[in-house]
Image (cartoon, helix red, strand yellow):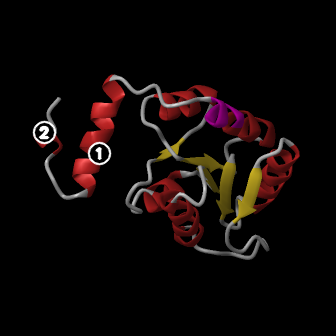
Amino acid sequence: MKIALGADHRGVAAIKLLAEKLGREGHTVEIVGDSSGQPCDYPEPAFRVASKVASGASDLGVLICGTGVGMSIAANKVKGVRAANVHDELTAQLSRSHNDANVMCLSADLLGQRLIEKIVEEAIATPFSGGRHTRRLEKIGAIEQGKDPASVKD
């Protein structure tokens, strides 16, 4: 799987360790943006990773900041991105199976490295389940186009 990773200064240590682990497992991994650990504004790595995912250059994105909230808000501004702020394996699994989330946003401050890695493992392993959830994604697409989601019919 091609995975784009990004972090602000609070998540840079975690993203580097995650990149090493995913690389050892055979994934194609790219840390997008500055990973020097110098202070940076989270919208910049969020945009870069989300753009990679939206363009199809990456299959999955992972963003890490202090809480994951800012990254999620910023990444969701990129059309075609469904970024989820996840905090455990269950939210990772449900965000992928129900929402077809393509960017995982995680907290460097609230999650340990082991849990971060387990969350990403779950995200990678979980496919979109389709079915009734497909209609809901179509409604999200309608919102992206400035339309009322109620206009989407079965």
Which residue in the structure is indicated by mark 2? 150
| Residue 139 image position (x, y, % from top left) | 24, 41
124 inside magenta stretch: yes
Residue drawn at x 56%, y 28% is 93
Residue drawn at x 67%, y 44% is 110
Q: Tag 2: residue type? A: Ala
Which region shows up in magenta? 121-125
| Residue 30 image position (x, y, % from top left) | 73, 61
Give neighbour class at mark 1: few <14, some 14-19, many 20+ (Cα, 10 Å).
some
Residue drawn at x 61%, y 56% is 58
Q: Quadrant of residue 118 in the image?
A: top right
Q: Which mark is residue 16?
A: none
Nearer to the camera, 154 or 73: 154
Disc 1 secondary structure class? helix
| Residue 39 image position (x, y, % from top left) | 69, 75
Q: Tag 1: residue type? A: Ile
Q: Is residue 123 above or below residue 9?
A: above
Kindly check if marks 1 and 2 are in contact, taking CB atoms under 8 A apart as contact.
Answer: no
Q: How many marks?
A: 2
Which corner quadrant holds the C terminus?
top left
Q: Is residue 115 above or below residue 109?
A: above
Which residue in the structure is indicated by mark 1? 140
Going from N to C along the chain, the mark reached first, 1 or 2, is 1
Say left or right for 140 vs 150.
right
Disc 2 secondary structure class? helix
Cα–Cα gap, marks 1 and 2: 10 Å
